[in-house]
Image: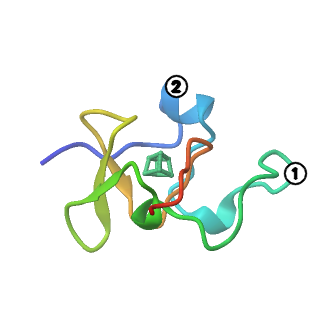
Amino acid sequence: ELPELTEDDPMAIGLGYKKDTTTVDAAKQPRHTADQQCSNCALYMSKSETAGTCAIFAGKHVSATGWCSAYAKKA
Ligand code: SF4
């Protein structure tokens, strides 16, 4: 079981990762929209209903409803 990525992880801070996409600060992240979350990001691989792995945050689980500034819409 991989550890969960926390918002205070240095890389998470660098990419503005939030466990809950609805808590992203719109002023800081103008690209963000409410429908964007890890579960519909191209870099996400689902491991359960609530969490999965991300190509950027190796060795950690990100939240299915999370978000970071590297978000790329799944094709
Ligand atoms: Fe979530 Fe995508 Fe950011 Fe990874 S790159 S943390 S899957 S939004």
Q: Is residue 51 left or right of residue 21?
A: left
- What is the x, y in percent for residue 53? 28, 49
- What is the x, y in percent for residue 47? 19, 61
Rendered residue at 52%/35% (across/down): 12
For badge 1, the amino acid type reads Ala
Residue, disc 1: 27
Q: Which mark is residue 17?
A: none
Q: Earlier in the sequence, mark 1 or mark 2?
A: 2
Q: Which mark is residue 10?
A: 2
**Secondary-structure class at tag 1:** loop
- What is the x, y in percent for residue 66? 50, 59
**Secondary-structure class at tag 2:** helix
Is 21 drawn above or below residue 1 in the view shown?
Answer: below
Disc 2 residue lies near ligand 1 with CB under 8 A: no
Camera-side residue: 25 or 35? 35
Rendered residue at 57%/52% (across/down): 18
Is 11 drawn above or below residue 18 in the view shown?
Answer: above
- What is the x, y in percent for residue 56? 40, 35
User: What is the tally of numbered marks visible in this picture?
Assistant: 2
Alpha carbon separation for disc pair 1 and 2: 21 Å
Q: Residue furthest front?
A: 75
